[in-house]
Amino acid sequence: MSCTGIKVTSKSGQTFWGRTQEFDLEFDYIGVVFPKGFTLEQSFIKTKTRYCFGGIGIADEGEALHFVADGVNEKGLSGGTFYFGNYNRYLSLAEIDALGKKPLSGVEFVTWALATCSSVDEVRKRAEEVAITYEAGPFWASFPQHCVFQDSSGRSIVVEPSIPGDFEIYDNPVGVFTNSPKFDWHLANLQNYVGLTDTIKPGRNFGEAAVVSSGKGNGLFGLPGDFTAQSRFVRAAVLTELAQPVENHEAISLLFHLLDTSDIPKGVVKTEIGVQYTQYTSGYDLTEKRIYLHTYDNRQIQSFSLDDLRGRQEVLVFEIDQQQKIAIMRPRKEKLSV
């Protein structure tokens, strides 16, 4: 599963975050907002929400599951759950109970954190209260997962269940996130790409041969272009670092352009289950608590906000339009001179 997350900071210091969601199973994705004081029915525990939060969820037979794959809460904390194959270390329910902790399924940590935490510091602190089980609950098999969080201060952390019954938690100074291997490996791997640049490398002589430059973009020659987690991490980190700074109103557009560099077309990545592709791409304004997304079939950006709840106590569900919308162009009124 080949998800990519990117944080963008505007010129004025506001934080925006987004991710691609790739999978080889089909889900009924929805936009969803959960109110403050609502009781979430998670696989093994009930969690009362301390904060209103919303994001991209899943409906099962028309009913919204108490879950978001990625989201933001009223305090400006955002997060996403990503596949973490081969490196997760989960426990049984009995082992978690013996530790005096609450059990969560692999995909439920982000939902729990957004419902109960106000900042990345609080996520780091309260992560000690829970542990991840490998046992399947009524809603999910316990997929291998790790998580990334950002808050409106601009700080970002990575939470990886790579210790049985516990987590390794890293500061995320690059604001980029993908999948296995562990996050500290990805940071070390960036050493191999410090020579990449946004400038044009000039031509040079090799012996008596004058070799001309290959031209625009050759400063990025060697930037990996495949869809492995290792390559997507490097590509996202380099392009985010080199991208032109933007104003607040331009940040979501930049975020989607950067995430599009990891977009997987149907058919180019096949697994033993089926075809893995970018099912949706989402973006978050952590100041306005507004969610943006487009899907594989509908590239028009759709949006909703935590403010849409307007004090109501029920769960608010938004249908995601999967039908591509194409604007028909109209001729300009004035005539162009010939």
Image: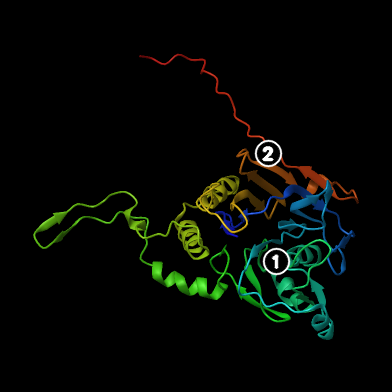
Q: Residue furthest bottom?
A: 98
> Which numbered tag is attached to residue 230?
none
Badge 2 amino acid: Gln
* Rendered position, 306 above or below 331: below
Quadrant housing residue 88: bottom right
In percent of width and height, residue 127 lies at 74, 75
In percent of width and height, residue 118 lies at 76, 66
The residue indicated by pointer 2 is: 322
* Rendered position, 123 above or below 252: below
> Which numbered tag is attached to residue 143?
1
Badge 1 amino acid: Phe
| Numbered disc 2: secondary structure | loop
* Rendered position, 140 above or below 333: below
Quadrant housing residue 182: bottom right
Q: Foreground: 109 or 195? A: 109
Image quadrant where one finds the C terminus: top left
Image quadrant where one finds the N terminus: bottom right
Say which label, 1 or 2, has the lower sequence index: 1
Q: Foreground: 29 or 284? A: 29
